[in-house]
Image (cartoon, rainbow, N blue to C red):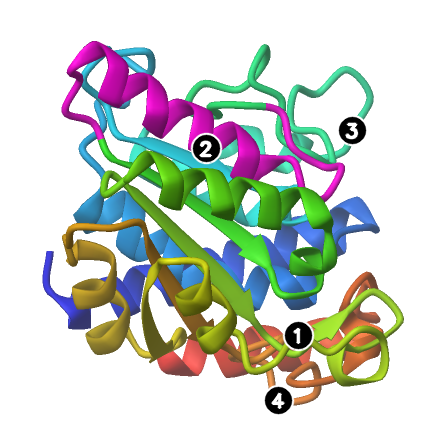
Amino acid sequence: MEPIELERIARQIRLRDLQAVYEAGAGHIGGEMSVIDILTALYFRVLRVWPDQPKHPERDRFVLSKGHTACALYVTLAKRGFIPEEEISTFLQPHSRLNGHPNNNKVPGVETNTGPLGHGLPVAVGMAKAAKLSGAKYHTYVITGDGEMQEGSNWEAIMAAAQFGLDNLTLVIDHNRFQQGAALADTNDLAPLRPKLEAFGWEVTEINGNVMNEVVPALEYRGSRPHCIVAHTNKGHGISFMQDRVDWHHKVPSREQYDLAVAELSEAI
């Protein structure tokens, strides 16, 4: 699928994600909007997956380490055919399998439970190492938040990946510059990220993570070492009043705000 078509799908996913968060009365909408372009490129172009066989042994693995943006993943999985699209309306409802964090035991296409930050990358390193040990050809991708990179467990995993020579592993850091309650610069500022990853022996690509023509080639790149994509994104991307606003990390739009956001996203489709 070409980038222009991927952009159209990403806008549709943003619109459905917005609706789901508004109707549920909860969600991490800012970080969902920032990461949707990457999720779209993965599921509609890059990942080798079979929605009717979610546990196919040859499937590529994807871990959403920033599990609080689960709604964006659910909408993407539904649009790709892993779960019914009408099920999105059950997000966060009693007895729904679409919880606030993705659950491998409930949702087809979810590789591992995530939510506690700093866990997804270590698990993904294990998946990539398992492929090396078994001779499997699948590639493992993982998305973390930039605030999440403050977790020491990630850096232990980064060291291990370099030591094991995991050229079948791609880490995407959703570098939207904000975390819960504050800007990254005001908490524990890891920027710039690139030299730190390079110092640990990784190949690093920096892109605009909200521009599909940059996202796709970065995800499809294959080198001789573990690969990190530092994806510079905008919190709340696509919705003017949410963009780059820390208060939209975990907030629900009012009816007036919802109507405005729908109008902006619909105009772009």
- In the image: residue 183, left or right of residue 206: right
- Residue 24, image x, y percentages: 78, 45
Q: Which numbered disc, 3 or 2, marks the residue that appears first in the sequence?
A: 3
Confirm or deny contact between disc 1 and disc 4 (CB under 8 A): no
Q: CA distance from mark 1 to mark 4?
A: 27 Å
- Disc 1 crowd rating (10 Å Cα; few below 14, some 14-19, many 20+) is some
Q: Amino acid at mark 3?
A: Gln
Q: Which numbered disc, 3 or 4, marks the residue that appears first in the sequence?
A: 3
Nearest-to-viewer mark from 3 and 2: 2
State whether residue 253 is above or below residue 25: below
The residue at 67%/68% (across/down) is 30
The residue at 80%/73% (across/down) is 188
Mark 4 sits on what residue? 240
Mark 2 sits on what residue? 124
Mark 3 sits on what residue? 93
Q: CA distance from mark 1 to mark 3?
A: 36 Å
- In magenta, the rendered stretch is 113-138
Nearest-to-viewer mark from 1 and 2: 1
Find numbered disc 1 in the image and state the secondary structure of the residue it sits on: loop
- In the image: residue 186, left or right of residue 73: right
Q: Amino acid at mark 1?
A: Leu
* Disc on res. 190: 1
Find numbered disc 3 in the image and state the secondary structure of the residue it sits on: loop
Q: CA distance from mark 4 to mark 2?
A: 34 Å
State whether residue 7 is above or below residue 140: below
Q: Amino acid at mark 2?
A: Ala
Q: In terms of image quadrants, where is residue 218? A: bottom left
Find numbered disc 2 in the image and state the secondary structure of the residue it sits on: helix
